[in-house]
Image (cartoon, helix red, strand yellow):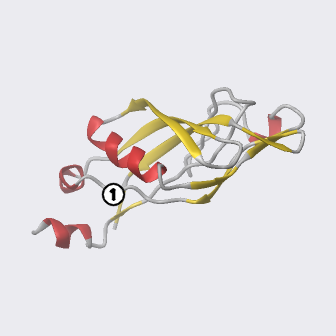
Amino acid sequence: MKPSSFAHSARRVSVLAILITLAGCAHTALRSNSEPAGPTAANLPPGIVAPRALHIVNPMYPYQMKRLGVTGTVNLKCLIAANGNIGDIEVISATHAEFTDAAVEAVKRWTFAPGTRDGQPTAQRIMLPISFYLTD
């Protein structure tokens, strides 16, 4: 099967990312069928509102990983500027190195509403887990 026809198959990649922040500190995220691993938006310090993704771009699934049926997650630490632009992106971990470039390139195209502190836009660091999984 040619790569282009495989890419257009019924299988697709999806991204699950819930943004949660703690005043510029490390954060946590949820997958659709798991429990929170740490703090949630409900227990952010008073006056802090997390950045919110306005436009999410799904990453391209690396062809070889898709062909082999390999799934995984890339954890990124990102700076969301006070104007909502994404700044520094750091790869914290990845189940497979082959997923890192695709995850970073996709997140560079995301747009955000900035986080706020006491109603004022502020730069905040967030953790974004980018999950690669196949669906039929």
Badge 1 element? loop
Task: Choose top left, top right, bottom left or bottom right for residue 22.
Answer: top right
Image coords of residue 62 (percent x, y): 25, 52
Image coords of residue 90 (percent x, y): 46, 32
Q: Find disc 1 in the rendering and name its residue.
A: 60
67 horizontally vs 47: left or right: left
Between 43 and 46, the residue placed more toward the observer is 46
Q: Label 1 is placed on what type of residue?
A: Met
62 horizontally vs 132: left or right: left
What residue is shown at x 23% (from left), y 49% (from top)? 65
Q: How many marks?
A: 1
What residue is shown at x 34% (from left), y 48% (from top)? 102
Image coords of residue 75 (percent x, y): 47, 36
| Badge 1 density bin: few <14, some 14–19, many ≥20, Cα 10 Å | some
Image coords of residue 52 (percent x, y): 68, 52
Q: Residue furthest front?
A: 83
What residue is shown at x 41% (from left), y 44% (from top)? 104
Q: Residue furthest left?
A: 1
Task: Choose top left, top right, bottom left or bottom right for residue 63.
Answer: bottom left
Task: Choose top left, top right, bottom left or bottom right for residue 10.
Answer: bottom left
- For the N terminus, the quadrant is bottom left
- For the C terminus, the quadrant is bottom left
What residue is shown at x 47% (from left), y 60% (from top)? 57
